Image: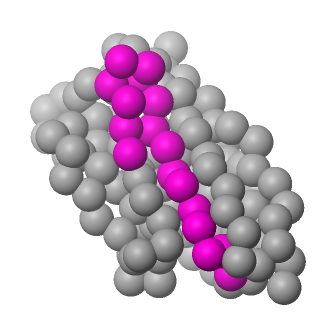
Amino acid sequence: QVQLVESVGGLVQAGGSLRLSCAASRSIFSLSTMAWYRQAPGKQRDLVAAVTVGGSTNYADSVKGRFTISRDNAKNTVYLQMNSLKAEDTAVYYCNAGRSFTPKYDYWGQGTQVTVSS
């Protein structure tokens, strides 16, 4: 059974930092593009950052220069380092493991709340 287990988020003041982690099942991690999405109340779920198997990254414009995604292949874990947090970063953050070619799949973590107080 595939699992994505996210770390607990938290409450942080604006300007502060927080690191999220997501441990994935070994069976899929090495094959997957790993990503973080977020969903604020009343809004759609949007991509925050992604890292491919080869290590290429891409970021939403709103987090460029503040967030860093990384993966530790030895630990089957992806991280999201969030710096200079803003109130608008408040959302539920979801870890995703995906593959767009055979075998295709798309797995999600349970979500973790990040709240930034202004």
The residue range painted magenta reads 70-86
Question: Which of the 4 quarters of the picture holds residue 82?
Answer: bottom right
Whether 45 is among the magenta residues is: no
Q: Quick one: 23 or 71, which is closer to the camera?
A: 71
- Identify the residue shown where x is 21% and y is 38%: 53
- Location of residue 67 in the rendering, given as x and y in whole percent from the top left corner: 48, 65
Question: Which of the 4 quarters of the picture holds residue 44?
Answer: bottom right
Question: Which of the 4 quarters of the picture holds residue 68?
Answer: bottom left
Q: Quick one: 50 or 15, which is closer to the camera?
A: 15
Q: Quadrant of the C terminus?
A: bottom right
- In the figure, is residue 96 to the left or right of 87? left
Q: Quick one: 106 or 111, which is closer to the camera?
A: 111
Taking 49 as reference, is 54 above or below it? Answer: above
Taking 43 as reference, is 39 above or below it? Answer: above
Query: Can see residue 12?
Result: yes
- In the figure, is residue 20 to the left or right of 49? right
- Identify the residue shown where x is 45% and y is 38%: 78
